[in-house]
Protein backbone atom coordinates (compact mmCIF):
# COMPACT_ATOMS: atom_id res chain seq x y z
CA UNK A 1 0.00 0.00 0.00
CA UNK A 2 1.28 3.50 -0.85
CA UNK A 3 0.29 4.90 2.56
CA UNK A 4 0.32 3.64 6.13
CA UNK A 5 3.86 4.42 7.25
CA UNK A 6 3.08 7.37 9.54
CA UNK A 7 0.40 7.51 12.24
CA UNK A 8 -0.97 9.75 14.97
CA UNK A 9 -1.94 8.07 18.24
CA UNK A 10 -3.19 9.43 21.58
CA UNK A 11 -2.19 7.69 24.85
CA UNK A 12 -5.00 6.31 27.07
CA UNK A 13 -4.20 8.43 30.13
CA UNK A 14 -7.85 9.48 30.44
CA UNK A 15 -9.40 6.56 28.54
CA UNK A 16 -12.59 5.20 30.13
CA UNK A 17 -16.14 4.07 29.39
CA UNK A 18 -18.26 6.66 31.20
CA UNK A 19 -21.08 6.88 28.63
CA UNK A 20 -22.53 4.56 26.01
CA UNK A 21 -22.75 5.70 22.39
CA UNK A 22 -22.48 2.30 20.69
CA UNK A 23 -23.73 -1.22 21.54
CA UNK A 24 -20.33 -2.33 22.85
CA UNK A 25 -20.04 0.29 25.59
CA UNK A 26 -21.26 -0.82 29.01
CA UNK A 27 -20.65 1.79 31.71
CA UNK A 28 -20.91 -0.93 34.36
CA UNK A 29 -17.95 -2.84 33.01
CA UNK A 30 -14.77 -1.34 34.45
CA UNK A 31 -11.80 -0.44 32.26
CA UNK A 32 -8.34 -1.45 33.49
CA UNK A 33 -6.41 1.69 32.59
CA UNK A 34 -2.97 0.23 33.40
CA UNK A 35 -3.69 -2.69 31.10
CA UNK A 36 -5.00 -0.24 28.47
CA UNK A 37 -1.71 1.70 28.69
CA UNK A 38 0.31 -1.50 28.21
CA UNK A 39 -1.84 -2.60 25.26
CA UNK A 40 -1.55 0.84 23.65
CA UNK A 41 2.25 0.72 24.10
CA UNK A 42 2.41 -2.75 22.56
CA UNK A 43 0.38 -1.55 19.57
CA UNK A 44 2.66 1.45 19.07
CA UNK A 45 5.74 -0.79 19.25
CA UNK A 46 4.19 -3.28 16.80
CA UNK A 47 3.50 -0.54 14.26
CA UNK A 48 7.05 0.76 14.63
CA UNK A 49 8.52 -2.73 14.32
CA UNK A 50 6.55 -3.14 11.08
CA UNK A 51 8.24 0.01 9.72
CA UNK A 52 5.83 2.83 10.61
CA UNK A 53 6.54 5.98 12.59
CA UNK A 54 4.08 6.99 15.29
CA UNK A 55 3.53 10.54 16.51
CA UNK A 56 1.82 11.24 19.80
CA UNK A 57 -1.12 13.57 20.38
CA UNK A 58 -1.24 14.86 23.99
CA UNK A 59 -4.35 13.41 25.73
CA UNK A 60 -6.90 15.68 27.39
CA UNK A 61 -8.87 15.11 30.60
CA UNK A 62 -12.63 14.76 30.16
CA UNK A 63 -12.33 13.20 26.68
CA UNK A 64 -12.23 9.43 27.38
CA UNK A 65 -12.66 8.44 23.69
CA UNK A 66 -9.88 10.74 22.44
CA UNK A 67 -7.63 7.66 22.07
CA UNK A 68 -9.60 6.86 18.90
CA UNK A 69 -7.70 9.34 16.74
CA UNK A 70 -9.17 7.80 13.55
CA UNK A 71 -12.32 9.79 14.28
CA UNK A 72 -10.70 13.21 14.65
CA UNK A 73 -10.72 14.01 10.96
CA UNK A 74 -9.75 12.95 7.45
CA UNK A 75 -6.12 13.39 6.41
CA UNK A 76 -4.90 13.36 2.81
CA UNK A 77 -2.31 15.27 0.78
CA UNK A 78 -1.13 16.99 4.00
CA UNK A 79 -4.59 18.47 4.53
CA UNK A 80 -6.76 17.84 7.60
CA UNK A 81 -10.56 18.02 7.49
CA UNK A 82 -11.66 18.09 11.16
CA UNK A 83 -14.54 15.73 11.95
CA UNK A 84 -17.94 16.84 13.09
CA UNK A 85 -18.70 14.10 15.61
CA UNK A 86 -22.24 12.82 16.21
CA UNK A 87 -22.24 12.76 19.99
CA UNK A 88 -21.73 15.71 22.35
CA UNK A 89 -19.40 13.65 24.53
CA UNK A 90 -16.75 13.52 21.78
CA UNK A 91 -17.20 16.91 20.18
CA UNK A 92 -14.24 18.48 22.00
CA UNK A 93 -11.69 16.12 20.45
CA UNK A 94 -11.01 17.41 16.91
CA UNK A 95 -9.99 20.93 18.04
CA UNK A 96 -6.95 19.48 19.84
CA UNK A 97 -6.02 17.49 16.76
CA UNK A 98 -6.43 20.55 14.52
CA UNK A 99 -3.93 22.40 16.71
CA UNK A 100 -1.47 19.50 16.44
CA UNK A 101 -1.95 19.42 12.64
CA UNK A 102 -1.29 23.16 12.35
CA UNK A 103 1.89 22.82 14.39
CA UNK A 104 3.01 20.01 12.08
CA UNK A 105 2.45 21.82 8.79
CA UNK A 106 -0.87 20.28 7.77
CA UNK A 107 -3.41 22.57 6.13
CA UNK A 108 -6.77 22.77 7.91
CA UNK A 109 -9.81 22.52 5.65
CA UNK A 110 -13.01 23.42 7.49
CA UNK A 111 -16.16 22.18 5.76
CA UNK A 112 -19.54 23.48 6.93
CA UNK A 113 -21.47 20.24 6.48
CA UNK A 114 -25.21 19.71 6.95
CA UNK A 115 -24.58 16.82 9.35
CA UNK A 116 -21.90 14.83 11.14
CA UNK A 117 -18.93 13.01 9.59
CA UNK A 118 -16.60 10.98 11.78
CA UNK A 119 -13.19 11.34 10.20
CA UNK A 120 -10.92 8.66 8.79
CA UNK A 121 -12.62 6.03 10.95
CA UNK A 122 -15.58 6.47 8.63
CA UNK A 123 -13.59 7.38 5.49
CA UNK A 124 -10.83 5.01 4.36
CA UNK A 125 -8.46 5.55 1.44
CA UNK A 126 -8.29 2.82 -1.12
CA UNK A 127 -6.76 2.92 -4.60
CA UNK A 128 -6.38 6.72 -4.74
CA UNK A 129 -9.97 7.35 -3.64
CA UNK A 130 -11.85 7.45 -0.35
CA UNK A 131 -14.59 5.03 0.78
CA UNK A 132 -16.88 6.56 3.38
CA UNK A 133 -19.64 5.12 5.52
CA UNK A 134 -23.01 6.76 6.10
CA UNK A 135 -26.22 5.84 7.86
CA UNK A 136 -24.77 5.30 11.34
CA UNK A 137 -22.42 8.08 12.47
CA UNK A 138 -21.87 10.10 9.31
CA UNK A 139 -24.30 11.85 6.99
CA UNK A 140 -24.01 11.09 3.29
CA UNK A 141 -24.45 14.76 2.35
CA UNK A 142 -21.54 15.69 4.60
CA UNK A 143 -19.23 13.46 2.56
CA UNK A 144 -20.56 15.08 -0.62
CA UNK A 145 -19.62 18.49 0.78
CA UNK A 146 -16.17 17.28 1.86
CA UNK A 147 -15.62 15.92 -1.66
CA UNK A 148 -16.65 19.22 -3.27
CA UNK A 149 -14.46 21.30 -0.96
CA UNK A 150 -11.34 19.11 -1.25
CA UNK A 151 -11.60 17.72 -4.78
CA UNK A 152 -11.16 14.18 -3.42
CA UNK A 153 -13.31 11.39 -4.83
CA UNK A 154 -15.43 9.86 -2.07
CA UNK A 155 -17.50 6.72 -2.69
CA UNK A 156 -20.19 6.28 -0.06
CA UNK A 157 -21.26 2.95 1.44
CA UNK A 158 -24.49 2.55 3.40
CA UNK A 159 -23.90 1.04 6.86
CA UNK A 160 -26.90 -0.67 8.46
CA UNK A 161 -25.76 -2.47 11.61
CA UNK A 162 -25.36 -0.38 14.80
CA UNK A 163 -22.62 -2.78 15.99
CA UNK A 164 -20.48 -1.93 12.94
CA UNK A 165 -21.02 1.80 12.89
CA UNK A 166 -17.93 3.02 10.99
CA UNK A 167 -16.42 2.05 7.61
CA UNK A 168 -13.33 0.75 9.49
CA UNK A 169 -15.66 -1.81 11.11
CA UNK A 170 -16.69 -3.26 7.74
CA UNK A 171 -13.73 -2.75 5.38
CA UNK A 172 -9.95 -3.09 5.59
CA UNK A 173 -8.07 -2.52 2.31
CA UNK A 174 -4.86 -4.60 2.22
CA UNK A 175 -3.54 -3.52 -1.19
CA UNK A 176 -5.06 -2.71 -4.59
CA UNK A 177 -6.30 -6.29 -5.06
CA UNK A 178 -7.14 -7.51 -1.57
CA UNK A 179 -9.40 -6.31 1.23
CA UNK A 180 -10.99 -7.72 4.38
CA UNK A 181 -14.78 -7.32 4.44
CA UNK A 182 -17.22 -7.64 7.35
CA UNK A 183 -20.44 -8.07 5.35
CA UNK A 184 -22.94 -7.83 8.25
CA UNK A 185 -22.60 -4.07 8.49
CA UNK A 186 -22.98 -3.27 4.79
CA UNK A 187 -26.38 -2.52 3.23
CA UNK A 188 -27.66 -5.28 0.98
CA UNK A 189 -27.73 -2.97 -2.06
CA UNK A 190 -24.12 -1.84 -1.54
CA UNK A 191 -22.40 -5.16 -0.79
CA UNK A 192 -22.38 -6.47 -4.41
CA UNK A 193 -21.14 -3.08 -5.63
CA UNK A 194 -18.25 -3.15 -3.17
CA UNK A 195 -17.41 -6.79 -3.85
CA UNK A 196 -17.31 -6.01 -7.58
CA UNK A 197 -14.45 -3.59 -6.92
CA UNK A 198 -12.35 -6.05 -4.91
CA UNK A 199 -10.67 -8.76 -7.03
CA UNK A 200 -9.79 -10.80 -3.92
CA UNK A 201 -12.01 -10.17 -0.89
CA UNK A 202 -11.50 -11.92 2.43
CA UNK A 203 -15.05 -12.16 3.75
CA UNK A 204 -15.24 -12.57 7.52
CA UNK A 205 -17.63 -14.96 9.25
CA UNK A 206 -20.02 -13.50 11.86
CA UNK A 207 -17.73 -14.85 14.57
CA UNK A 208 -14.65 -13.20 13.05
CA UNK A 209 -16.56 -9.92 12.72
CA UNK A 210 -17.34 -9.97 16.45
CA UNK A 211 -13.59 -10.13 17.12
CA UNK A 212 -13.09 -6.96 15.04
CA UNK A 213 -10.62 -8.61 12.61
CA UNK A 214 -11.54 -5.96 10.01
CA UNK A 215 -10.32 -3.21 12.34
CA UNK A 216 -6.69 -3.80 11.42
CA UNK A 217 -3.78 -1.63 10.30
CA UNK A 218 -1.64 -2.49 7.29
CA UNK A 219 2.02 -1.42 7.28
CA UNK A 220 3.63 -2.61 4.06
CA UNK A 221 3.08 -6.36 4.12
CA UNK A 222 2.36 -6.56 7.87
CA UNK A 223 -1.24 -6.66 9.08
CA UNK A 224 -1.58 -5.63 12.73
CA UNK A 225 -4.83 -7.13 14.03
CA UNK A 226 -6.78 -7.28 17.31
CA UNK A 227 -7.40 -11.02 16.75
CA UNK A 228 -6.93 -13.52 13.94
CA UNK A 229 -8.50 -16.90 13.23
CA UNK A 230 -6.46 -19.71 11.70
CA UNK A 231 -8.49 -19.36 8.51
CA UNK A 232 -7.83 -15.63 8.15
CA UNK A 233 -4.16 -16.08 9.02
CA UNK A 234 -3.74 -18.79 6.37
CA UNK A 235 -5.38 -16.65 3.69
CA UNK A 236 -3.31 -13.59 4.57
CA UNK A 237 -0.12 -15.67 4.54
CA UNK A 238 -1.01 -17.09 1.16
CA UNK A 239 -1.35 -13.53 -0.13
CA UNK A 240 2.10 -12.64 1.22
CA UNK A 241 1.14 -10.81 4.42
CA UNK A 242 2.57 -11.31 7.89
CA UNK A 243 0.05 -11.17 10.74
CA UNK A 244 0.83 -9.54 14.09
CA UNK A 245 -1.88 -9.80 16.75
CA UNK A 246 -2.04 -7.17 19.51
CA UNK A 247 -4.53 -7.66 22.32
CA UNK A 248 -6.63 -4.50 22.70
CA UNK A 249 -9.29 -5.96 25.02
CA UNK A 250 -9.68 -2.74 27.04
CA UNK A 251 -10.43 -0.67 23.93
CA UNK A 252 -12.96 -3.22 22.66
CA UNK A 253 -15.00 -2.21 25.75
CA UNK A 254 -15.42 1.18 24.05
CA UNK A 255 -16.24 -0.41 20.68
CA UNK A 256 -12.86 0.25 19.08
CA UNK A 257 -9.75 -1.75 18.17
CA UNK A 258 -6.47 -1.41 16.29
CA UNK A 259 -7.48 0.76 13.33
CA UNK A 260 -9.59 3.14 15.44
CA UNK A 261 -6.57 3.88 17.64
CA UNK A 262 -4.57 5.25 14.69
CA UNK A 263 -4.86 8.10 12.22
CA UNK A 264 -2.76 7.70 9.07
CA UNK A 265 -0.89 10.91 8.24
CA UNK A 266 0.68 9.95 4.90
CA UNK A 267 -2.34 9.36 2.66
CA UNK A 268 -1.90 10.74 -0.88
CA UNK A 269 -4.94 10.96 -3.16
CA UNK A 270 -5.12 11.77 -6.82
CA UNK A 271 -6.85 14.98 -7.72
CA UNK A 272 -9.01 15.05 -10.83
N1 LIG B 1 -16.28 4.81 21.72
C1 LIG B 1 -15.95 5.32 20.44
C2 LIG B 1 -17.21 5.78 19.73
O1 LIG B 1 -18.21 5.13 19.86
C3 LIG B 1 -15.22 4.29 19.63
C4 LIG B 1 -14.78 4.78 18.29
C5 LIG B 1 -14.25 3.69 17.39
N2 LIG B 1 -13.69 4.28 16.22
C6 LIG B 1 -13.68 3.74 15.00
N3 LIG B 1 -12.99 4.35 14.09
N4 LIG B 1 -14.38 2.68 14.68
O2 LIG B 1 -17.25 6.77 19.07
Image: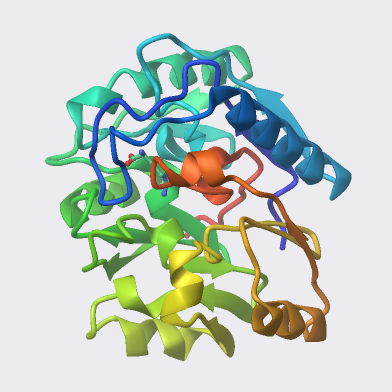
Q: Position of residue 221 (x, y in %)?
A: 81, 65
- The figure's colour scheme reads rainbow
Please name the residue shown 29% across and 33% down the image. Answer: 28
Residue 163 visible? The answer is yes
Seen in the image, is 31 located left or right of residue 201?
left
Q: Is residue 20 left or right of residue 51?
A: left
Report the residue at 47% width, 68% height from top.
171
Is 229 placed left or right of 17 in the picture? right
Residue 185, percent across and down?
31, 71
Residue at 26 percent of width and 47 percent of height:
22
User: Which residue is most to the left?
Assistant: 114
Give the x, y percent position of residue 54: 73, 32
Q: Residue at x 53, y 65 (%)?
A: 214
Looking at the image, residue 166 sits to the left or right of residue 97; the answer is left
- Name the residue nearer the viewer: 150 or 121: 121
Q: Position of residue 118 (x, y in %)?
A: 33, 42
Could you tell me if residue 75 is visible in this image? no
Please tell me whether residue 174 is drawn above or below residue 112 in the rendered image: below
Q: Quadrant of ligand 1?
A: top left
Q: In this rendering, is residue 200 above or below 54?
A: below
Q: Quadrant of the N terminus?
A: bottom right
Q: Nearer the viewer, residue 82 or 67?
A: 67
Numbered marks: total: 0
Instruction: Find the residue positioned furthest to the top.
Output: 61
> In this picture, is 199 found above or below 13?
below
Amino acid sequence: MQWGKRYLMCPPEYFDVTYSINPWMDVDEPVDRDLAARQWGTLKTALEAAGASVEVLPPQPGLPDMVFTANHGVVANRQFVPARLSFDQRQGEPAHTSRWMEEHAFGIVQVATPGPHEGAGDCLPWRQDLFAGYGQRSDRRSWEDVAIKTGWTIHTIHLTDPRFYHIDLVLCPLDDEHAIIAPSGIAREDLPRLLDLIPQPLILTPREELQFMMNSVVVGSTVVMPACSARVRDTLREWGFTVVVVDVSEFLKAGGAVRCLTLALDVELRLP
